[in-house]
Image (tube, rainbow, N blue to C red):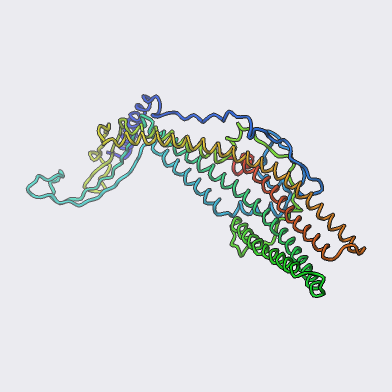
Amino acid sequence: MPVSSLARVSTSFVVRVAALAVAPLLLAACAAGPDFKAPAPPAVDGYAPRPVKTTAATPNVAGGSAQHFEAGAYIPGDWWTLFHSAPLDALIETALKHNHDLKAAQAALRVAHENMLAQRGAFLPSVSANLSASRQRQPGSLAPVPESNAFLYNLYTPQLSISYTPDVFGGNRRAVESLQAQEQAARFQMIATWNTLASNVAVAAIQLASLQAQIDATRQLVDANTRMLDILRYQYDKGYASRVDLAAQESQLAQTRATLPPLEKQLLQQRDQLAVLAGRFPSQATGDQVRLDRLQLPTALPLSLPSALVAQRPDVRQAQANLHAASAEIGVATAARLPNITLSADAGSTALEFSRLFTGGTGFWDLGAGITAPIFEGGSLLHQQRAAKAAYVEASEQYRSTVLAAFQNVADTLAALDQDAKALQSAAQAEQAAKLTLDLTEHQLKDGYASNLQWLTAEQTWQQARITLVQAQANRFADTAALYQALGGGWWHHPDLNKQ
């Protein structure tokens, strides 16, 4: 048979196979298993019984502005820029480019995407080509196979094979649907990693600035206690102070010095953490640090509507995608219990000489169809279907738990911001009162109405109040960053993340 004739036969053959493949699909009305419906948003209208609209203000203090909560306000994808700190912006941008956990999450998303595309291949026929060559010898007691009656001959056979399993009951469609949902779960896992990373870097940088300020104040406090101890020793030698007073001051100095190593340890560990978050080794930590007095507290804070929160939080969207995947797996398990149709075909040529391939009389073809229906599998298919239904219930409960945790996270953060503002107000008042006491004592010391010991005591009280104020300021900045994370981080406004 000429090559052109064989091509026409193969084309006709493929058309027949395609017709047989399409016919069962036209008979299939729907896919096995339930169609997924996204859960409805929770029917609540707030995050707390008595929501706070505006936090307390502390004038003339860094981070002391009142914060107003605006329902449904815009959440930028780069929310950390609202603190107006160039070092903070640089730290977060570096982490988002080089953090290895984020890169791993991005790779996991690519894995899920490729797995989904691989499963889509089952919608199309499988085509394979085969070329075999053999040398055979037939026993003399049997009639020779070739026309030439030769007992020893070569046999060449090129062959094209096509097989196709129509998705009659939608098992493959459900499998692709499950993998698409798993890809979405991987996507939102990556977004959650991105969101958490930005928040962790911001909080770590704020805590680092707080620790540095606390260490500076503590060192000044140690100096004040040391000077006070020197005065008491002098007075003790002159008989103006008792041994009890001297021992008490020695204890006070030792206790103050004991607070420095833990603070310095936390500072070093926080610096190491920032380096690792940015994808660097601890020895490669940069010298640029955030300073609390140079941070600007955002005063207009967004507060997403409860119905919108479930669409913004990546962990909730991931849980919903997992629920979708579990729903599709019920269809996969259901279709496995139904009959399975397989279509197959082969076309090729066989000859004793390679040069005679595709000549007249060497071509062959065959068409086949088969149906397989499970009758007895020891109950395995039934239990697999029941397991898929139980997995859906599990994913459903996990989704509800994730939603509740998301609402708790927002409520806790809102309560923290309210209390942070009040704590800062009290800390500022205490610091101002201690500073006023120090100033008055200093004037009295100049006029001879106060002793050096009284002045040092006032300075010690002021330094301790400064440390408390620094902690209150850091808490307010950190919890503001936590609110943006709790509301989803604005990823839907970020061009690199808002891709379907």
| Residue 42 visible in the displayed image | yes
In-image side of 230 versus 143 (left or right)? right
Q: Position of residue 366 (x, y in %)?
A: 26, 35
Which residue is farthest right? Answer: 447
Front one among 385 and 442: 442
Does any portion of residue 369 appear in the rendered image?
A: no
Q: Position of residue 319 (x, y in %)?
A: 51, 38
Q: Residue at x 92, y 63 (%)?
A: 447
| Total tally of numbered discs in the picture | 0
- At 70% from the left and 59% from the top, the residue drawn is 212
Of residues 183 and 443, which is closer to you in this image? 443
Tell me: 281 left or right of 380.
right
Q: Quadrant of the N terminus?
A: top left
Report the quarter where the C terminus lies.
top right
Residue 459, placed above or below residue 194? below
Q: Residue at x 62, y 44 (%)?
A: 485
- Snapshot quadrant of residue 373: top left
Q: Pick out the residue farthest to the bottom.
A: 237
The x and y percentages for residue 423 are 72, 46
Residue 296 position (above or below residue 366): below
Q: In which quadrant of the rendered view does residue 5 lie? A: top left
Residue at 58% from the left image edge and 54% from the top image edge: 99
Q: Is residue 22 above or below residue 236?
A: above
Looking at the image, which is closer to me, 38 or 260? 260
Residue 8: x, y in percent?
A: 33, 34
| 453 lies left or right of 175 | right
